Image (tube, grey):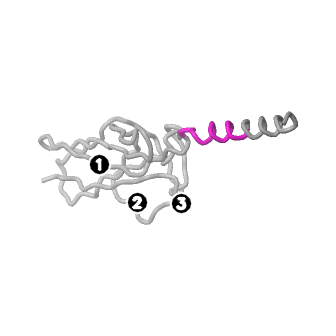
Amino acid sequence: MNRFWPFILLLLSAASLTLACGSSSSNRQLQSITINSTVSGQQVQFTATGTFSSAPTTVSPLPVDWGIGPFAPPPASVQYTLTTQPYVFDCTGSGPYLPVSTLAPSDPNAPTTGSLPFANVVTAVAPIPCQ
């Protein structure tokens, strides 16, 4: 029976290492972004909420990069700078208005600024509710 101990210890070590790697939060991914708007006079304030694949599943405000207009056609890569600050749009001009857009890396551990392939970001677009 003593001759099996080294083999058993090796199996237990491998299982322990596999469990430690598998329990990492690196599998957590951003799945979707919801854009919320609040109108106050001539200004519209937008905030972003993110839904993730594992806990915490909802993050608000989500750090995002704001812009105007849809991602059409999608670029090969994007430069981004994330912020949790709301995006404020002033409705004093004349429409029609392009939609507000936002993006964030699907990896929540990505740096707050950088460049990523478009396939590695999550996007959302919402209309600007100016009267």
Please tell me which residue is depicted at 28% across the width and 55% down the height of the picture. 126
Mark 1–mark 3 Cα distance, whole angstroms, equals 24 Å
Mark 2 residue crowding within 10 angstroms, few (<14) / some (14–19) / many (20+): some
Left of 3 or right of it: where is 122?
A: left
Give how far across and how far down residue 63 sits, in percent: 40, 39
Give how far across and how far down residue 18 sits, in percent: 66, 41
Q: Which mark is residue 71?
A: 2
Left of 37 or right of it: where is 72?
A: right
Q: Secondary structure at mark 1?
A: strand
Left of 5 or right of it: where is 12?
A: left
Q: Nearer the viewer, residue 109 or 65?
A: 109
Residue at the extreme right: 3
Asked if residue 19 is positioned above or below residue 73 in the image, the reply reads: above
Q: Which mark is residue 76?
A: 3
Sequence-first tag of 3 and 2:
2
Mark 3–mark 2 Cα distance, whole angstroms, equals 11 Å
Left of 90 or right of it: where is 5?
A: right
Q: Secondary structure at mark 2?
A: loop
Instruction: Specify whether residue 76 is painted magenta.
Output: no
Please tell me which residue is depicted at 37% across the width and 45% down the height of the picture. 50
Instruction: Give the residue type that dot 2 points to.
Output: Phe
